[in-house]
Image: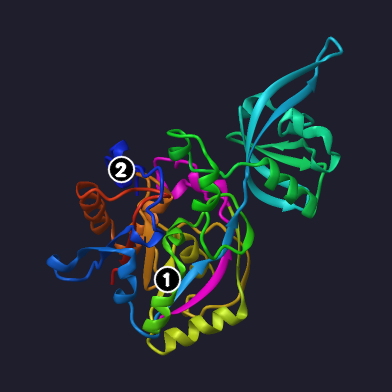
Amino acid sequence: MQLADFDFDLPDSAIALRPASPRDSARLLVVTPDAPPAAKMRDLTVRDLPGELKAGDLLLLNDTKVIPARLKGVRHRPNHEGGESQVAVEATLHRRLAPHRWTAFMRPGKRLAEGDRIVFGEAQDRACLLGALDATVTAKGEGGEVTLSFDLSGPDLDAAIAERGAMPLPPYIAAKRPQDERDRADYQTVYAAEDGSVAAPTAGLHFTPELFAALAARGVETAFVTLHVGAGTFLPVKTEDVAEHRMHPEWGELDAATADRLNVAKAAGGRIVCVGTTSLRLLESATGEDGVVRPFMDETAIFITPGYRFRAADGLMTNFHLPKSTLFMLVSAFAGLETMRAAYAHAIATGYRFYSYGDSSLLWRAA
């Protein structure tokens, strides 16, 4: 398939710059591909989610926690005159390689070379050595991606990043307004537990304690997996032939107890509904062609496009995605490309809010 197959016109006014408040007051578009035409799309709110599910269904959520992964700093490099040249840079941490090493997307990436030293944080922060956040560029890849080796390691590095860093709002929000303290809470699910993501699993942003209570009262089960979302999720697809695109790997974990619960729920006739594309990608990575979910603890770079045969997921709750993105390709694979084109046209025409802070959809898998 070609990249143009996944394009659509989206007005700037549709991009949400703040989330709905309260979280579960966001709109919910329910899409049932195999229903009669009049019932294919229904406009609800997230609070209506329990009524769309039945006892024995299982919601699978990603409990990753977003770290403040955007860091501003200064590149230091000796010059020929015996002095030092300095350039302001910004890093978005992407993937942890070791207790002291991260890959990062850097701006301006072209101004960096192996061996460069980068001092992150404000100058007045340097009084405490433990708080110093300095790194060396140890490798340089394509598209501004570099490997940073920090002087600090483990919990000390984590604490320094938490102090110096800013929440990594998606580019389509960050370009329209500055990040502020509200985003520290808004860009985090209420059930976030495992540090490691540099982007939120945004479908989960709509959940509240009250919604979880209503789901439990309905007899709907919940289970948690962990997939640490990398900044690669924001990178555009640059190949016209979609099959030539390569995903950045992300670390995920689905433990044995959760695998057992998923298999038992399916065997009893329950439906597995993934909250977010990250949960779905991890579930599909952990499921064999026989439909059995197995424990998984590894990186996944699974790329789901139309033609993919889903092994475990029956439903998907997800926000509205960018044109020509891997996420729009995934939802098109799940519910059908023509169905999703129609659903997005309906969403735009009726004022749904798009992207990370936007409204949500509940998609049922096409037969």
Q: Find out whether the residues at labels 2 and 1 contact each other: C-beta distance under 8 Å.
A: no
Point out the stretch of residues depicted in magenta: 220-248
Q: Secondary structure at mark 1?
A: helix
Question: How many residues crowd mark 2 within 10 Å: few (<14), some (14–19), many (20+)?
Answer: some
User: Cα distance, mark 2 to mark 1?
Assistant: 28 Å
Quadrant where the C terminus is found in the figure: bottom left
Q: Is residue 274 above or below residue 103?
A: below
Circle number at residue 66: none
Q: Which residue is mark 2?
A: 14
Whichever of labels 2 and 1 marks the residue nearer the N terminus, that label is: 2
**Of residues 199 and 300, the one drawn nearer to the viewer in this rendering:** 199
Residue 311 appears in the figure: no
| Residue 173, position as x, y percentages in the image | 44, 39
Q: Secondary structure at mark 2?
A: helix
Residue 329 left/right relative to 248: left
Q: Which residue is mark 1?
A: 210
Residue 231 highlighted magenta (yes or no):
yes
Residue 261 left/right relative to 142: left
Quadrant of residue 78 within the rendered picture = top right
Q: Residue furthest left?
A: 38
Residue 91 left/right relative to 17: right
| Residue 249, position as x, y percentages in the image | 59, 54
Q: Is residue 236 above or below residue 284?
A: above
